[in-house]
Image (cartoon, grey):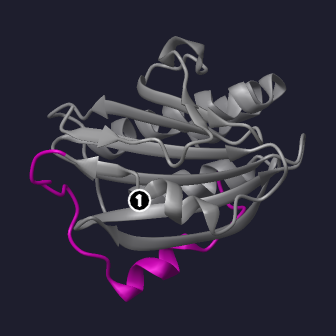
Amino acid sequence: MDCSFTLPGKDWEWLDPKMAPAPAVRVLAFVRNHTGMKVVLRCDPVKPSEIVGRRTYSNFANCIIKTGQWKRLGAKHLSFQGVPSYRLDLQSTRDGYGHSLLIAFSNNRAYILQVIDSRGPVGPDADAIFANFAFTAPPKPMLPPHDDDDDQDDAITSAGTSLPQKAGEFLWGLGSVGFVCLIIFGAWAIIRIRGS
C-alpha cells in the first residue's frame, strides 16, 4: 500500500485490524494506548472512473457537519509529506469523543488516518500521531497544491441535502461505529458523485 505506520510510543499497542469497525475501506493498522486513545489507518484504491477534485474535502466535511451529530472543532487544508491533504477535527455530540482525521489522496488511493480520543477533543496530540505515518514510495499527489481560495469552500451551509448526508442520518444511530462507516461511505459517495 506504499505506506507504513509506527507506534507513537511505548505505551501503544498493535491491535488486530479486524477489531476496528468494518466499513468498506481496508484497515491497514489499528492501535491504542493505555488512556484509550485509538488510531485507525485506512486505505482504499481510487478507481479510474472516480474523480478527486478541489472540493472533495470540503464536501466531505459539510456532509458530516450537516447531520448535527458532530461539532466541528477545526478544519484546514495542509501539505502532509508533500501531499495536499485535509485535516478535520470533530467532537461527537453523542458521546463527547474527539476525532481528528487526516485525509490524503495519493498513489491512486485514499488514505485516512483517524485518531479517536474517548476523553474529548484530540488536540495537538494528533500532529505527533500523524507523524508516525510515512509513504514508503514517493507519493504521487492526486490534487494540486492547496490554494487560499480553497478555505472559502469549507464554509458550512445548510442548503441542499446530499446523498452522503442522507446516509449519515441513517448511520448516526450506530454511534462511533456509524461515524467511521459514514467517513468511508461519504468519501466513496463524493468521489462517485464527482465522477458522474
Q: Is residue 139 magenta?
A: yes
The quadrant in which the C terminus is found is top left
174 shown above or below 74:
above
**Side of 57 relative to 160 (left or right):** left
Residue in the image at 55% along x and 21% along y: 15
- Marker count (numbered): 1
Q: Residues within 10 Å of mark 1 (few under 14, many from 20)?
A: few
Query: Is 26 rendered above or below residue 55?
Result: above
Q: Residue 49 appears at what percent x and percent y?
A: 18, 34
Q: Quadrant of residue 79?
A: bottom left
What is the quadrant of the N terminus in the image? top left
Image position, residue 184 (x, y; %): 50, 32
Q: Position of residue 117 (x, y in %)?
A: 74, 47
Q: Compare residues 35 and 18 and report the one nearer the observer.
A: 35
Residue 130 or 159: which is nearer the viewer? 130
Is residue 145 something that shows in the picture? yes
Residue 171 vs residue 3, the one in the foreground? 3
- Please name the residue that numbered disc 1 is placed on: 131
Q: Is residue 196 visible?
A: no
Q: Position of residue 167 (x, y in %)?
A: 65, 30
Q: Is residue 11 magenta?
A: no
At x 68%, y 61%, the residue is: 159
Q: Measuring 45% from the left and 40% from the top, which residue is drawn there?
A: 187
Tell me what residue is drawn at x 25 percent, y 40 percent: 3
**Left or right of 144: which side holds 104?**
right
At label 1, the amino acid type is: Ala
Region in magenta: 136-160
